[in-house]
Image: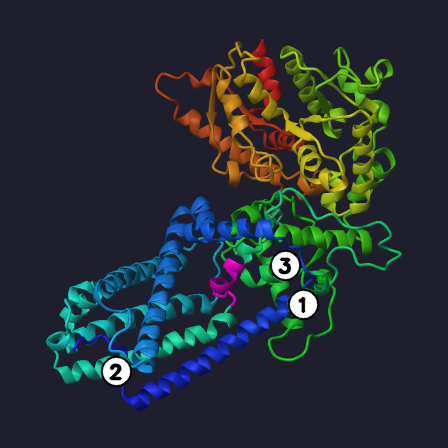
Amino acid sequence: MVTREVFWNISPLGELIFYLIALIAVVIFAYGIYSHVRRILQGKRVSFTVRPLLAKLSAAIASIAANRTILRHDAPAGMMHFLIMWGFIVLFIGTVIVTIEYDLFQKILGMEHGFWVGSFFLGYEVILDTLGVLFLIGLIWALIRRYGLRPPQLTWKPLDLALPLWLLFIGITGFLVEGLRLAATAAELGYDPRWSWAGFLVSQWVQTASVGTLRAWHLALWWMHGLLALGWIAYLPYAPKVMHILSAGVNLFFQDMRPRGRLELLDVEGAFERNEVLGFQTLKDLTRKDFLDLASCTECGRCEANCPAHLSGKILSPREIILELRTHANEEFPAFGRPKEHKQIIGYSIKPEEIWACTTCMACVEVCPVFIDPLNKIIELRRNEVMIQDKYPKGFTDVFKGMDGRGNPWDMPASERLAWIKGLDVPIVSALAASNPSPDFEYLFFVGCAASFDPRTQKIARSVVKILQHAQIKFAVLGEEEGCTGDPARRIGHEYIFQILAKQNIEIFNNYNVKKILTICPHCFNTLKNEYPALGGQYEVVHHTQLIEQLLRDGRLQLTQEIPATITYHDSCYLGRYNRIFDAPRAILQKIPGVKLVEMERHRERGMCCGAGGGLMWLEEEPGKRVNELRVQQAQAALDVHLRRPAAGEAVRSRRSLVASACPFCMIMLEDGIKSKNAEFENKDIAELVAEALG
Ligand code: SF4
Ligand code: SF4
């Protein structure tokens, strides 16, 4: 007889009791899932179409299978998770196979064997033992990481220790049970036990014991293993931390595949008359996807560890935003009983200071392994605070006044918009249109408010003009007709002002038959490219780093002037994380003769914000908690490393030290940080460096 039956050492009564307990575990599990689904269905519907459905399915499977997000941002933790996840999946599939074989083929159909024979069985044994061992290694690694290495973002609740230990005991008792069975049935086994290599090693360790002792230990450990596993199944939907095993895949599948830089358009026209709530006031306003996000959070803290607000000592933590909303949701939609009265979120579960510390940098969204979006919740909470409650930090009053009254957050008169062109020959669209109803220009150079009014960033616009003229590109500016894109108002939460400004700009663009827009500001770039289409404004939008890089590749620009400098590049969030433009700025810098490019520790996808986004440029930050100062220290550290360790024969002391940026907002923040930290480097926009290198 081939001995591999699951219940070979269990009495028929024991078998029956086991199945009864299994049934209870499944019922408890199913109720837990039901209460999650019931809570999620309280949310508003989200639009879902078939075409992205297939893309979503493949993206979700690929992302989960490869553990892509964790591996990209934290390779050791990603590897650890990879072992646990694949170990868990394979062991689970293995258990399902055994159950089908035993219950269906052997018990119900009365066959001696189903498909669990021959090479399939032997392969199954090798794979399960190997993945089982890797599963244990992953769990031990997780315990060492959490309790030995102690990364600051990980929490210390007692249950955090219990859960991996629970799985560890399931795994260890599983191998002990296998080893004891192999040792006790060695004579009648009917196959080479070395195929079950991990169990075989255990059997070698216990083989000297009598069969009676082996059977007694097997019986005790079999029950322990079975009950631990069933208990785990029953508990799974009630343990928020491990619930992600089930919800992460669903959340990935339902992720928003539209451009990540766009915010949902709000129907603000007549909203007051319709007595509509704008943004998130209570949990009633969340969507089903938002509730799914809350159920999926693993509490891993990666979002917190990358949040500039948190890193600079502010009250905000994106993980806490999610967990506070989750606790609130569990209170109002309990697993048992009827939903409770809805409380206003701000002031009850979330403090206003939390949402007003967010720079909208998207670092939390970028690193979240289960594709949770804390940022969209913050924006929706801001929308309600601004448009319904009329509550926001005082610093925004002038920003709204300027944008509403004069079309720019600086509250400057439109006549000042051309101050930066003094001494330059810059064509203005209205003047061109006066002589030709179809003005002849390739790019509309959308200057943006910062480079129009701020004396330091005006130099970026002047450099871009020099570059365009050098490459003989036909362009024109709107001058007094240009208005703010509306980005600061939108990110602060004022959708009304955003839509007014956006519609005005779109009307002007369409009047002049604009097809291509060039911007130097990543905030303008993101809004024009990703958000104007929802209001009917479709244009080809390019950032100046993209255009310059193309011109260099086409040979239309030659950088001949050497700039002996060590440069570290600061990624703008709205250019990098929002629009995935990481390579073009670096490619340009590498083409400038004499430039040595060094990277900060936080760069590209993990680049840290300058602190200006989300309208925060207009808020005063507490000394000692300034994001821009932290970023300047990071830049200084990167440049210092190079100064300490120059390449062989390099005279670094004679070189300039620079941080390069590609955003006027970043420049304003970095310049301020450099001054307050007395840093020993300059800040230049990439356009300024290119203009200098043109000679
Ligand atoms: S968007 Fe940036 S600042 Fe806001 S919560 Fe996320 S990581 Fe923090
Ligand atoms: S939101 Fe995502 S990154 Fe943040 S703690 Fe939850 S799972 Fe981790």
Query: Label 3 amino acid?
Result: Asp
Which residue is denoted by mark 2 in the rendering? 219
Q: Nearer the viewer, residue 438 or 131?
A: 438
Q: Are marks 2 and 3 in contact (CB under 8 Å)?
A: no
Q: Is residue 242 magenta?
A: yes
Please indicate whether residue 27 sits to the left or right of residue 546 in the image: left
Which residue is denoted by mark 1 in the rendering? 42
In this rendering, is residue 52 above or below 561? Answer: below
**Which quadrant holds the N terminus?**
bottom left
Q: Is residue 451 magenta?
A: no
Q: Nearer the viewer, residue 657 or 344?
A: 344
Mark 2 to mark 3: distance in Å? 46 Å
Q: Secondary structure at mark 3?
A: helix
Mark 1 to mark 3: distance in Å? 10 Å
In this rendering, is residue 60 above or below 484? Answer: below
Query: Label 1 amino acid?
Result: Gln
Residue 290 disc label:
3
Q: Where does residue 450 sit, x and y in percent of width and height?
A: 73, 29
Q: Which residues are magenta?
A: 240-250
Q: Quadrant of residue 187?
A: bottom left
